[in-house]
Amino acid sequence: MRGRKKELNLKIIITIQKTILLTTIFYFNLLFMNMFWDALFLLVAGLLGGFLNTVISSGSAVTLPLLISFGIPPNIANATNRVPVFVGFLSSTIQFHKKKLINWRKTILLAIPLVIGTVLGVLFVEDLPAKAISKIIIIALFVSLTIAIIKFRNLSLKKNNTQTKITIVSYLLFCLLGIWGGIIVLDTATFILFSLMLHLGIDFIEANATKSALCLIFSFVSLCLFALNDNVNWYYGGCLAVGSYFGGYIGSKFAVKENTRKWVFILLIALISLEILHMIIKNL
């Protein structure tokens, strides 16, 4: 009897051990698969975001809400989003530089007030309520959409041949753009592109290349500031960044074609309209 009890107890112990082992293996397999699909999803989103940022802008309309949907707090998502933005613009700026489309003297002059504004924006956003940010975004998107529609012909069809000199107004304008970029990167590239084309009279292709270089600089500064405060999730940001690098590369090839000008601005108007709709629904 005692021998049978020992055998029975041993079988029970072995069964429990097998169950624990199989459960552990299943759990880790499930965890690995979830991480794999999450990483793949982030890579694809980063690819799309990097492409859109390079071709026109609004790539953060894809990546920023995605980060929040993964359960990342809005302030951490806002900081983490700078990683794919920086890497995507690094990729596109390298390609634009190879094609000699960037006027680095003008870019550096505009980058000075842009960086100053970025630092002020990052410091300001730390004390800004989330609801206030949402309202500011909606107002800014409406302004952007209005400009895109009213100036559609000038922006998308007309090729600028005369450029305006950089003035004190230009410095003030780009300082304000830097403040906006420091607060939230969403549509900063759009506002920079519009400013280059409408205020300084730079043609679309050169303006797009200059925009990429300026966004590279301001996103690097803001990323460093957020990283110093330990607000960056490097795993999610890194996954998005890998996709964003290739998206920026592909976008740089697409953005230099003259026949894409009209379709790029139609895409911009559509994206901004969707952003406004999304923000309004979210805040209802």
Image (tube, helix red, strand yellow):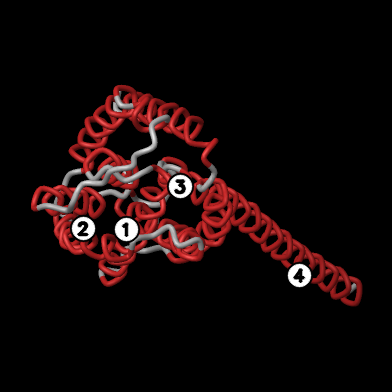
Crowd class of label 2 (few under 14; some 14 to 19; many from 20; radius 10 Å):
many
Inter-mark Cα distance, 1 to 4: 59 Å
Give the total number of marks visible in the rendering.
4
Residue at mark 1 to residue at mark 2: CA–CA distance: 8 Å
Tell which of 45 and 204 is nearer to you.
Answer: 204
Nearest to N terminus: mark 3 or mark 4: 4
Label 2 SS: helix
Q: Is 162 situated above or below 100? A: above
Going from N to C along the chain, the mark reached first, 1 or 2, is 2
Mark 1–mark 3 CB contact (< 8 Å): no
Check disc 2 and give the amino acid type. Leu
At 54% from the left edge and 47% from the top edge, which residue is drawn? Answer: 45
- Which numbered mark, 1 or 3, is in the foreground of this view? 1
Mark 3 burial class by Cα count in 10 Å: few <14, some 14-19, many 20+: many
Q: Residue furthest front?
A: 161
Contact (CB < 8 A) between labels 1 and 2? yes
Mark 4 burial class by Cα count in 10 Å: few <14, some 14-19, many 20+? few
Mark 2–mark 4 contact, CB under 8 Å? no
Residue bearing the label numbered 2:
114
Of marks 2 and 4, which one's residue comes earlier in the chain? 4
Q: Position of residue 269 (x, y in %)?
A: 40, 28
Please name the residue that numbered disc 3 is placed on. Answer: 63
- Residue type marked 4: Gln
**Does 168 sit left or right of 40 as displayed?**
left
Crowd band around label 1 with a 10 angstrom C-alpha radius: few (<14), some (14–19), many (20+): many
| Residue 127, percent from left and from top | 14, 52
| Dot 3 amino acid type | Thr
Q: Which mark is residue 214?
A: 1
Residue located beneath label 4 in the image? 17
Q: Label 4's element?
A: helix
